[in-house]
Image (cartoon, helix red, strand yellow):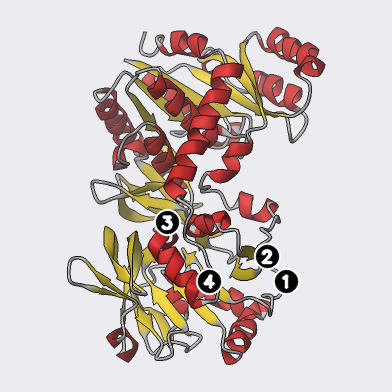
Amino acid sequence: MAALMLQGTGSDVGKSVLTAGLCRALVKRGLKVTPFKPQNMSNNAAVTVDGGEIGRAQALQALAAGLEPHSDMNPVLLKPQADRTSQLIVHGRIRGTLGSSNFREARRNLLPEVMASYRRLQQRGDIVLVEGAGSPAEINLRAGDIANMGFARAADVPVVLIGDIDRGGVIASVVGTRNVIEPEDAALIGGFLINKFRGDPALFADGYAEIARRSGWRGYGLVPWLDASARLPSEDAVRLERDRSRTSGRTMIACPILPRISNFDDLDPLKLEPEVDLVMVPPGSPIPAEAALIVLPGSKATIADLRAMRSEGWDIDILAHRRRGGAVLGLCGGYQILGREISDPLGIEGAPDRCSGLGLLDIETELSAVKALRRVAGVALGAEMTGYEMHVGETSGAGTERPFALLSDGSRDGAISSDGLVMGSYCHGLFEAREFRKALLEKIGATGGEADYGDSVNRALDDIAAQLERHVDIDGLLQLAQRAGS
């Protein structure tokens, strides 16, 4: 069974996008492709067809490959809750919490479960495309590794190393990786790709050749800056921190960037709306007073993010916005924040705790060990909607008697204030549905809802696949992939 692993010289070098693009390119060649990431760390996740959760990037790669997301595609997912603790998801389900004290040992013990998922995926198609995490050059993390060379060695999968030329120092980063990793690990690397190149490729010809000479690895291509990647959902909050660009519409929608923000790709469809100016508000900045709608996003640590919101003064901005007659929409953790109180008696997100919410909805939430994971459909704001639930906790109170959405299974979701301006929902992915997006925009005095977000993502994947066909030796990569398990 053919397999190929893409590892990087660091985080955010483009592994996820290149893996998705290669998935689409190989599918267009008639191959059955399955994406796989042994271990991921992200608070952006997707609900799978088997009722679990995986990293958003693997869900995108599944889409690129024409598959439904499955928990085997990302068997180990770490969702950071604090600086030194993460929720551990194994095969799509909560397994517990990992901290700095038990991280290495627990990770080593997960290798058999990672390999079980990989073996199952091998039976599903012609080739498995594997994405690494971080960098194999982080040799301090090599012991017990399951994300990079630990997996590659166990599965005997050939590796291509990706370097990011846009951040500078790409020659040193690729050659330096060769020099610091173990010889047995280096032997698995069959070549390199240089990503995010801008300008005339001839200007880097000597540098490209020097990387090959000094590393002993073959170059498989110089990938240009992929503008289409901006149209893809991202699972990495690094992108939020770096991207301060704004759209130019006349109706502003603002979203504060919470420390533990999750599933922030919920807002991506709004970027397609010509009348919308989507503003992601960074720490240290007030929420703009001219916003027509404030969206409170999902959170992996809701009580901690609520306190961070207050320390930023964003609670004052939100309450003032509400007094001026502005609309507020809370999604998942943001919905919980809009209520009167959030309690965590079992310490699901850390130490047992309790905190007063913003009090804009007559609800209260108690976090629990049971996690809701399901895809949903129904009607909200009089329009058809689809999405998925991914949350811990039960929300109750008089406010739920005015539900935000009526779901197709007969259940109700969320709450909405008596004047209809404060809304809360547990459903992620709401904005992808055009009719719902149109209804929400009309509610805040804007027009829109004509753009097809799913079509936009698919066209972006097609564009990236076409670029890779032009600039990458895909035939060579397929030959390398045949070495898996040899």
Q: Which mark is residue 282?
A: 2
Q: Which of the two discs, 2 and 3, labels the residue nearer the N terminus? A: 2
Contact (Cβ within 8 Å) of mark 2 with mark 4: no
Mark 3 or 4, closer to the camera? 3
**For this rendering, which residue is in front, 222 or 160?**
222
Amino acid of disc 1:
Ser
Q: Secondary structure at mark 4?
A: strand
Q: Which mark is residue 348?
A: none
Q: Which residue is mark 4?
A: 295
Q: Which residue is mark 3?
A: 432
Q: Tell me which corner region of the image, top left, top right, bottom left or bottom right, holds residue 353.
A: bottom left
Q: Which residue is mark 1?
A: 285
Q: Which of the two discs, 4 and 1, labels the residue nearer the N terminus? A: 1
Left or right of 31 in this view: 478: right
* Quadrant position of the C terminus in the picture: top left
Identified at 51% across, 86% down, the residue is 358
Amino acid of disc 2:
Pro
Q: Position of residue 458 (x, y in %)?
A: 45, 38
Q: Tell me which corner region of the image, top left, top right, bottom left or bottom right, holds residue 389.
A: bottom left
